[in-house]
Image: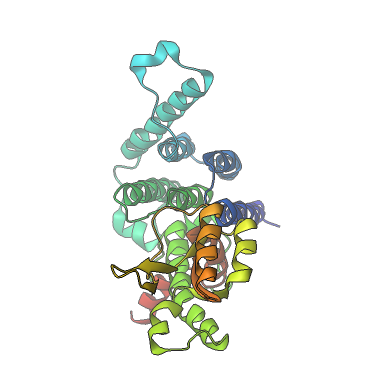
Amino acid sequence: MDVSYMIGWIRVFLLIVCLFIAARSDYSILKVRDQHWINWLFPSSILLLIELAILRTHATNLYMIAALIALASVSFTKPPSILHSAKWKLSEFTLFLIFIIGLVGLFGGALQNADTNFVNLILGDESSEITLWWSMLGAFITILAFLSAWKFGIIQGGADAKALILITIFAPSWQFLPDPITSSEESLFLLPPSIVIFLWASIVFIFAPPILLFQNVINGNIEHWTDLKMAWHSSRKLISEIPTSAVDGKQVWILTEVANQEDDQIRIVNRMLPRKNSPSHESILEKLSQLEEIGMEKVWIATKHPFIAYLFLAIFPLLIFGDPIGLIAGRFD
C-alpha cells in the first residue's frame, strides 16, 4: 500500500475525531476551548511534515508548514513582541522561531518559484516541487481569509473559524487527501478542501429549517397559520419536558413569553429570535413557572445548532463527491 495513501486516510480519521469532539463540546457546553485546537495542531502538522519528508521536497516547502502554524496561532494569541523578548517564556521563544522559519518558507519560496509558468501550474503540468509550494501558499491565503472573515463578522463563531483553520492545516490541498469516491475527470477546478467543507456544511445547514418545519407538522405543532413563523426555526414542547433538557446541558431559549400590557392584561408573545445572552438554568425554570401559572402547557423553544456539527458532517460529502463547485463548472464547460 502506498504510504501517502495510508497517511491520507489517517489524516481523515484524525480530522473526523477532532471535529466530532469539538462539535460535542460546542453542543453541550456552548464552546470549544482553545486548548482543543492547539492540541490538534501537533498531529496535523506532524502528518504534513512526515508526508513532505517522504516526498523529499525542497526545504522551503517544509518551512511552509511553519508559516501555516504561525498564521493559525494568531487566532489564539498575539505574536510575541521583540520589545519584550527579555521576558519571553519557552512557548514564546518557540512561537517566535516558528514565525522566522515560516517567513523563510514564504519569501525563500517566492524567490525560488518566481519563474513559475502559471498556465502550466493551472493545467497541472508544472513540476511537483513548484506545485506543492503554490498549494501551500494557497493554504496560507485560505487561513488568512478565514481569520479576516472572523474579524469582520462573516464567520460569527470563533470556534467555527478555528475549526476551518485547523482543517486547512490538516489538508492544505487535495494532494493530502484520498481521491473522492465518485471522483472523475469532470471537475474543471478544485477549491481548497477547507473551503469545500465550509460549502458542504452551508448546504447541510440550509436544509435544517425545512426539516424542522416538517417535524413540527408531523408532531402536530401547527395549530394556526401564525405558528408557521415559529415552526421553521423552533419546536413546541411540553413545559414538563423542558427543564430536563436544560439540566442535561442542552442550551434552551424559551421563545414564548408573558408580556404585561399597560392595562395589566396578560398577553402571550412568541419571539422570532432568542435573546442574545444565553439563559441560565434558573432563569429558564423561573420563566417556565410563570407560564405554567397562567395555564400554558406547551411553549416554543429554540436550541443551539452549532455550525461545527455541520462542518463535521460535511467531511462525508467531501470524501464522496469532492468539490461541488468544480463538478458543476465541469458539466457546463
Image coordinates of residue 182 in percent, x first then y, are: 55, 75
Q: Quadrant of residue 329?
A: bottom left
Residue nearest the viewer, comparing 139 with 230? 230
Furthest toward the top, the residue is: 86
Furthest toward the front, the residue is: 263
Image coordinates of residue 148 in percent, x first then y, are: 32, 48
Q: Quadrant of residue 250?
A: bottom right
Give the residue drawn at x 54%, y 76%.
298
* In the displayed structure image, the side of residue 298 where residue 329 appears, left or right: left
For the N terminus, the quadrant is bottom right
| Numbered circles on residues, count | 0
Furthest toward the right, the residue is: 1
Image coordinates of residue 93 in percent, x first then y, are: 47, 20
The scheme the figure's colours follow is rainbow
Give the residue drawn at x 41%, y 63%.
274
Q: Is residue 92 visible?
A: yes
Q: Is residue 305 visible?
A: no
Tell me if residue 160 comes above or below residue 207 in the rendering.
Answer: above
Residue nearest the viewer, comparing 27 with 316? 27
Image coordinates of residue 101 in percent, x first then y, are: 43, 29
Tell me if residue 182 comes above or below residue 10 in the rendering.
Answer: below
Tell me if residue 52 comes above or below residue 297 in the rendering.
Answer: above
Give the residue drawn at x 48%, y 39%.
65
* In the displayed structure image, the side of residue 222 where residue 50 appears, left or right: right
* In the displayed structure image, the side of residue 16 where residue 217 appears, left or right: left
For the C terminus, the quadrant is bottom left
Give the residue drawn at x 46%, y 57%.
194
